[in-house]
């Protein structure tokens, strides 16, 4: 019985971890991407240098980085280390690096 129970519990734990990771995933719709890219292009801001920050999806920007509002989009943007990023204002985590 124990040999069946241990793999089953391990499988459930693995599936729970996948569920938690999927819940954290942020999806930026193509429409939102277009709105953000156009707005950022029309409203450029100076880059803020943050030493030691590895910038990527999931990175957290410090409170010293001022977040800029984008009309009709729940996210904010900033230019950090010469990269324009879309940020969740509640968590200050990068949800997209804008090319």
Image (spheres, grey):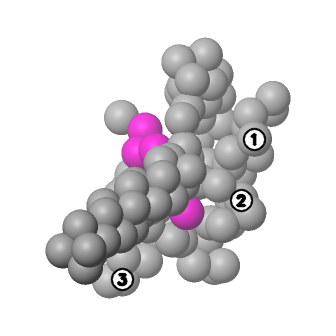
Image position, residue 19 (x, y; %) = 48, 52
Front label number (3 vs 1): 1
Image position, residue 49 (x, y; %) = 43, 72
Q: Can you see residue 68?
A: yes
Q: Is mark 2 in CB contact (under 8 Å) with mark 3? A: no
Of all residues, the one furthest to the right in this rendering is 72
Task: Find the distance from the CA under tag 2 to the CA under tag 3.
Answer: 21 Å
Q: Is residue 12 magenta?
A: no
The residue shown at (39%, 61%) is 12
Of all residues, the one furthest to the left in this rendering is 3
Depth check: give the residue in front, 10 or 62: 10
The residue shown at (41%, 45%) is 97
Depth check: give the residue in front, 94 or 39: 94
Mark positioned earlier in the residue sequence (1 or 2): 1
Q: How many marks?
A: 3
Location of mark 2 (residue): 89
Q: Quadrant of the C terminus?
A: top left
Of all residues, the one furthest to the bottom in this rendering is 52
Location of mark 1 (residue): 74
Q: Is mark 1 in CB contact (under 8 Å) with mark 2? A: yes
Q: Quadrant of the N terminus?
A: bottom left
Image position, residue 91 (x, y; %) = 66, 67
Mark positioned earlier in the residue sequence (2 or 3): 3
Image position, residue 77 (x, y; %) = 61, 49
Left or right, 55 with respect to 91, comes to left
Location of mark 3 (residue): 51
Task: Find the distance from the CA under tag 3 to the CA under tag 1.
Answer: 27 Å
Q: Quadrant of residue 59?
A: bottom left
Magenta region, main secondary structure: strand
């Amino acid at each position: 019985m124990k040999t069946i129970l241990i793999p089953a519990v391990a499988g459930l734990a693995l599936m729970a971890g996948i569920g938690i990771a999927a819940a954290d995933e942020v999806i930026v719709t193509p429409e939102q991407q277009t709105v953000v890219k156009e707005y950022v292009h029309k409203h450029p801001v100076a880059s803020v240098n943050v030493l030691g920050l590895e910038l990527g999806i999931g990175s957290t920007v410090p409170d010293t980085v001022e977040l800029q509002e984008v009309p009709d989009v729940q996210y904010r943007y900033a230019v950090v280390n010469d990269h324009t990023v879309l940020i969740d204002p509640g968590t200050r985590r990068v949800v997209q690096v804008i090319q």
